[in-house]
Amino acid sequence: MKLFKKGISIVQVQVIVWICITLLMFLLIFHEGQSIARSASFAICNAVFYAALMYTNACWMVPKFYRRQKKWLYVVLVLLLMAVTTWAIIQAQVVVMRLLPDKGMEKAMKPVTIPLRYYFVTFFLNILILLFSLPLRLAFDYFTMRKQQEQLKKRTAEAELNLLKAQVQPHFLFNTLNNIYFVAQRESPTTAGLLERLSNIMRYFVDEGPKDKIGLAREIDFIRDYIHLEKMRMRHPMQIEFDIKGEVNGVSIPPMLLIPLVENVFKHGINKRSEANFLQLDITVEAGRLDMKVRNRIFEELEPASHGGNGLVNLQSRLELLYGGQYTLHTEKQEGLFLAHLNIPL
């Protein structure tokens, strides 16, 4: 993410900050009468270990343990991390003192003894450094959220543009479909039914597609129309099991969120020459969440065409932008079946 007009990134800002911190420690140590080489070595060692302490806590321990309600384990690991860092800092300084002795002293002439109080002082400094890692974690979260918002805006703008391209004289198209529907109703009721479902799908794209949220019942009707039209392409009848559990009225979800899992079946899990095609679809609304399971048979002769494709990849990217870590999307092959499981908050 770019922070300034000249293009300074968040990574570059952190590098600049750590360079400034290292220079400041160098000046403080040099002011105490240490040589330039010693001051520079001490400053670099301290900066490296302080950075390791901060980023380990901010990037790994806080999200993996503290935010997952493993707070006691987090406290134990923090104490262990600070103890190890304290020991490592002091040992690094001992090495520097042996390699760069004071004037008049030979290298490694006698063992360097570190007073116990110095361990406590270093441990206390590590506590302060650890506290600075918390605003660092908040800063990472902020910039991640800003980046996700920008991506979502970009994707929304692209979707709106694609929708506008698709909306070429929609009223003329719908009127024409209605005219064909009335003619077909007299000549071929089956054809009229297909035209009606096609019209429903197109109205869904035009009317519901641009909205942020639509009724779950409307989304389910769209899926039923889609499945019915896809079945007409099959050479043999296809077994469909569509089960809805829970109250769907009054529930809203983003449009076109569920259809990629169904579309994936007809793209990758159908053999038009087989009589064993089937689709099992379960949608459950319970405890403020929507659970969707899709099953279809795997045909070995269609391999290595992969299940998944871009549809599921794009779906996962959209779910990440909409729900962050509050959703699950899992796919697997099991006993000749391809299973897809989606769970989202409502």
Image (cartoon, rainbow, N blue to C red):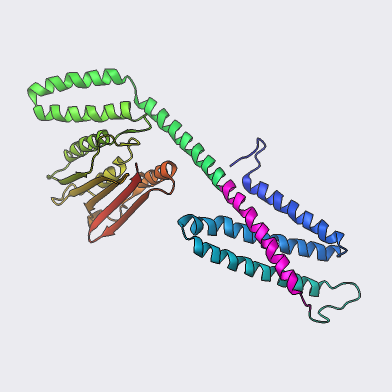
> Picture quarter containing residue 45?
bottom right
Relative depth, front residue between 300 and 26 = 26
In the figure, 62 relative to 222: above or below?
A: below
Give the image location of residue 69, x and y in percent.
46, 57
40 displayed left or right of 167: right
Judged left or right of residue 182, residue 214 is right
Q: Name the quadrant of the N terminus.
A: top right
Give the main secondary structure of the magenta stretch.
Answer: helix
Relative side of 137 to 187, left or right = right
Of residues 319 and 69, which is closer to you in this image? Answer: 69
* Residue that appears at 16% across and 30% down: 194
Which residue is painted at 28% across and 29% down in the image?
204
Residue 263 is covered by the magenta coloring = no
Residue positioned most to the right = 104
Q: Is residue 69 above or below residue 327?
A: below
Q: Position of residue 133 (x, y in %)?
A: 62, 54
**Which residue is farthest left?**
187
> In front here: 176 or 345?
345
Q: Whole-percent x and y of residue 298?
A: 23, 55
Quadrant in which residue 210 is drawn? top left
Would residue 268 be visible to someone looking at this image?
A: no
Q: Start and end of the magenta stretch?
A: 112-140
Residue at the (14%, 43%) spot, across then down:
235
Q: Within the magenta stretch, is there residue 137?
A: yes
Counting the numbered discs, the total is 0
Q: Quadrant of the C terminus?
A: top left
